[in-house]
Image (tube, rainbow, N blue to C red):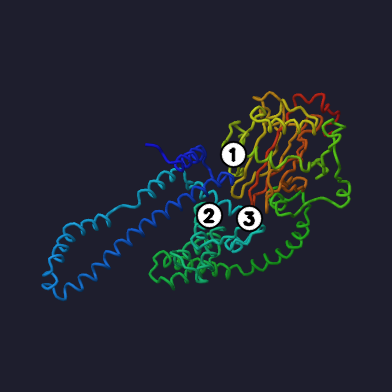
Amino acid sequence: MELPCWCLLLLSCLESLSANNDFFTSIGQMTDLLYTEKDLVTSLKDYIRAEENKLEQVKRWADKLDSLTSTATQDPEGFLGHPVNAFKLMKRLNTEWGNLESLVLSDTTDGFISNLTIQRQYFPTDEDQTGAAKALLRLQDTYKLDANTISTGDLPGVKHKNRMTVEDCYELGKVAYTEADYYHTELWMAQALRQLEEGEESPLDKVTVLDYLSYAIYQQGELERALDYTKKLLQLDPEHQRAKGNQKYFEYQLEKEEKKEKTTEKETEQQDRGKRDTTQTKKKKSQKTFSLIPERKKYEMLCRGEGIRMTPRRQSKLFCRYYDNKHNPKFVLGPVKQQDEWDRPYIVRYIDIISDEEIEKIKQLAKPRLRRATISNPVTGVLETAPYRISKSAWLTSYEDPVVEKINQRIEDLTGLEMDTAEELQVANYGVGGQYEPHFDFGRKDEPDAFKELGTGNRIATWLFYMSDVSAGGATVFPDVGASVGPQKGTAVFWYNLFASGEGDYSTRHAACPVLVGNKWVSNKWIHERGQEWRRPCGLNETE
């Protein structure tokens, strides 16, 4: 039996989906799911139309028989005295009611159910749903967003605003609860409760939400608030056994604390005096320099656009220019636009360096091959996925398409570095809240075998193309130096990972901030030491 064209197209799409998983790690591949869902909606509407048509036939039959039997039962003998009426009664009961039975029992769900069954095996998994939920929590922390802002969809740069339901908020709270993350459990259960109290209709009730909320607050050590919410729960459900037990326990614990406070009143006064002294010390300590702030906090600050350490004096020494790389013949008549982004480490951006057509071709080549991005385990050297790298990537070789070869040659012409020993062009697409936390591109001294199998030495430099604009988030930041570089479609940034001496430049430790709103595509070229001996001669000083 031949399959219809739409079915063959669907199977082709599903084969593409079946080769991948971890949908939440790539917005680009998640778009396929939208088309899958659209196809299911079309199939569902076909089923609804079939059911409506069947019911309409049954309704017409019932209306006809209702009128007929009402007339006939007023004078049964007179009605059946007409031979045609008698014949039609026999025919209806013997044949037509049987036909109606067949119609009622006919199954119109076959097309929809078979379509759903085929596609369900390629649906996102529990891991995808949990991954997307954790991404929202990560975005909430990194960009300091309150639960109500996320729930109402009021995010910067959004085009398609969508509100979260009570069930959505509850689901986020449950994911946090499963991870023993009681801070986020409280935030999202409180948001679910707020929406219920505002009158939003939901199959969930306040009792269920309050049960989680009170426990999450208790786990954070706030007994009084936990007791207040437990009492609210019992007002709604006085027979709730767990809440009744919790109320007694919370009251007992609070009573113990009050007794303890009374017996140690003098100690408390002394502690208060000590605290006043400590406060003055803390004020002095709070005047820390940016360099002493923990890396995680610096990373999040930079992602929010805070803590950028560029002084006006240093800024005045950064320039933009037309660049031809020492009169390279390819750029003498058409130099490229180059812009200084940072001084130490020296980071430059090339403007309009890759065309929209080239970007679309690169994405087209990469998309079917996208796989969950991995990191090299520093202990075992084995490639593995990591929760701090949420993206999918694919590698493109120069012989696959002229566009890839052309791009590689352009990088060589502009940097003056040999591309034959560089790694293949890596294309990456970030997922929900996609990020790559602080890392080095080069191998450190405690990783002597980092690139041993390549035989091309360490990663001397990084070239990074931005292949999409991002509405919010997604910057490349350098926490150690307080630098932030925003994604700008059609541009590329370049920096050296190693000093001319071959020593690693630790100030190049960088990160990709979580994408708050938008779809981030990048591609990068990691350039290695071998082949650069005459192109970038070794320096005499270690940090030269």
Residue 64 locus on image (x, y percent): 26, 67
Quadrant for the C terminus in the image? top right
Closer to us: 309 or 291: 309
Q: Report the disc number at residue 349.
A: none
Tell us which disc is closer to us: 2 or 1: 1
The three-letter code of the residue at mark 1 reads Lys
**Badge 1 or badge 3: first in the primary sequence:** 3
Q: Residue at x 51, y 71 (%)?
A: 197
Residue 138 locus on image (x, y percent): 61, 52
Q: Residue at x 71, y 53 (%)?
A: 301
On the image, numbered disc 3 is attached to which residue? Answer: 141
Position of 526 compared to 429: left or right? right
Rounded to the nearest angstrom, the CA distance separating label 3 from label 2 is 13 Å
The three-letter code of the residue at mark 3 reads Asp
**Badge 2 or badge 1: first in the primary sequence:** 2
Tell us which disc is closer to us: 1 or 3: 1
On the image, numbered disc 2 is attached to which residue? Answer: 176
Q: Residue at x 71, y 25 (%)?
A: 456
Position of 275 compared to 29: left or right? right
Dot 3 surroundings within 10 Å: few (below 14), some, or many (20 or more)?
A: few
Q: Report the disc number at residue 367.
A: 1
